[in-house]
Amino acid sequence: MQGGDAASDRRLTVFSGRANPELAARVAGHLGVELGQITLKTFSAGETYCRYDESVRGAHVFIVQPICGNEDTGIETNDALVELLLMIDAAKGASAHQVSAVMPWFGYSRQDKRSARREPISARTVAHVLEAVGVDRVMSMDLHADQVQGFFRRPLDHLTALYTLADYFRERVEDVVVVSPDVGRVKLNHKFAERIGAELALMTKQRPEHQVAEIGYVLGDVEGKCAVIVDDIIDTAGTLKAAALTVREAGAKRVYAAATHALMSGNAFENLAEAAFEEIVVTDSVPLRAGVPENVVVLSCAPLIADTIGRVVAETSVSEVLEGGMY
């Protein structure tokens, strides 16, 4: 990447961990660079090995590694975290100018506070460990709770795929009402509704235990409309299933879902099938599991990430990107 001063002329390198190499390749492609060469493997004892196969001295090193598992590469969520830490440490030890962790999905971000006594604040722990190994900058996308940013003392670029998702519906679906599945997502859904010029409805939700959601009722008019239920994460899809059934009972003629992170763990596929969505629109922030339903539409967040990386290297403002002005 060419720039106008010494800072922007520093070599830009993009490396991928094993959590989402397809996304890393797309990011590199948008930046016009080749993915960096690196050896990553797991020993028979379960330990991770990392070695950069090219010099990174003086370079801007961007490591694309969401904290998630990948069936194709055979790693689990915790493997991805350890691998990222080792990649950061190796790059720092090899005299990289700056090392940035590009974590579209910030694993452990939902554990951002203590819900009961004697629990850890796991998101804070992950932030502290990343800084302990020397990360200079972190990029993440649609954090489950904004307060996670406060756990970092280093710069954190908080991207959003909200506008990419919203524009998909603005161009394809009419007579839309945006439905927030719980009070905590109202701000997110309000921005989504504003982007496409739709009304907003709200649902009440309770969690009697982890990964179990109970939807109460709908506040707002959804009768005869196309309801788009917007959330940041699809995990077991229990919330989405309950929300879809509730808005159908309230008279919605069609129901869609939109979310940034398609974790789809456990019995997510079954829940999504029972909800009978017209479409489930997600991004490629994490790799999709095998057997994903045919009505899942994947939009790439690579252009957004690549644009942000380019601005960081050129030392120009990233505010326009972070606020969705370009997408």
Image: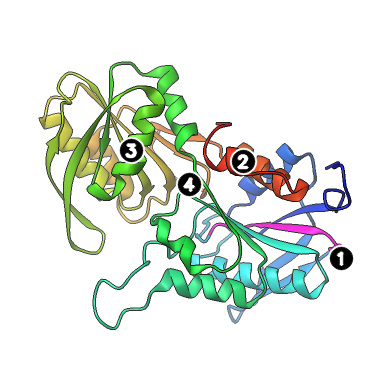
Task: Check residue 131 for magenta coloring.
Answer: no
In the picture, the quarter occupied by the N terminus is top right
Q: Which residue is mark 2?
A: 302
Amino acid identity at mark 3 = Asn
Outermost residue, top side: 174
Position of 130 with respect to 260 (left or right) is right
Marks 3 and 2, Cα distance to the nearest angstrom? 23 Å
User: In the rendering, which numbered label is found on residue 139?
Assistant: none
Q: Nearer the viewer, mark 4 or mark 3?
A: 3
Judge the density around disc 4: few (<14), some (14-19), many (≥20) Cα neighbours within 10 Å. Answer: many
Amino acid identity at mark 2 = Ala
Q: Which residue is mark 3?
A: 189
Marks 1 and 4, Cα distance to the nearest angstrom? 34 Å
Q: 315 or 233, which is in the foreground?
A: 315
Can residue 291 be seen here? The reply is no
Q: 4 or 186, which is in the foreground?
A: 4
In the picture, the quarter occupied by the C terminus is top right
Q: Secondary structure at mark 1?
A: loop
Q: Which residue is mark 4?
A: 288
Mark before the other along the chain sequence, 3 or 2: 3
Amino acid identity at mark 4 = Leu
Mark before the other along the chain sequence, 2 or 1: 1
Q: Nearer the viewer, mark 2 or mark 1?
A: 1
Predominant SS of the magenta segment: loop
Amino acid identity at mark 1 = Arg
Q: Which residue is mark 1?
A: 57
Q: Which residues are magenta?
A: 54-66
Q: Eyeballing the image, is 84 above or below 14?
A: below
Q: In the rendered image, which quarter is residue 274 located in?
A: top left
Q: Eyeballing the image, is 152 above or below 190?
A: below
Mark before the other along the chain sequence, 4 or 2: 4
Q: Secondary structure at mark 2?
A: helix
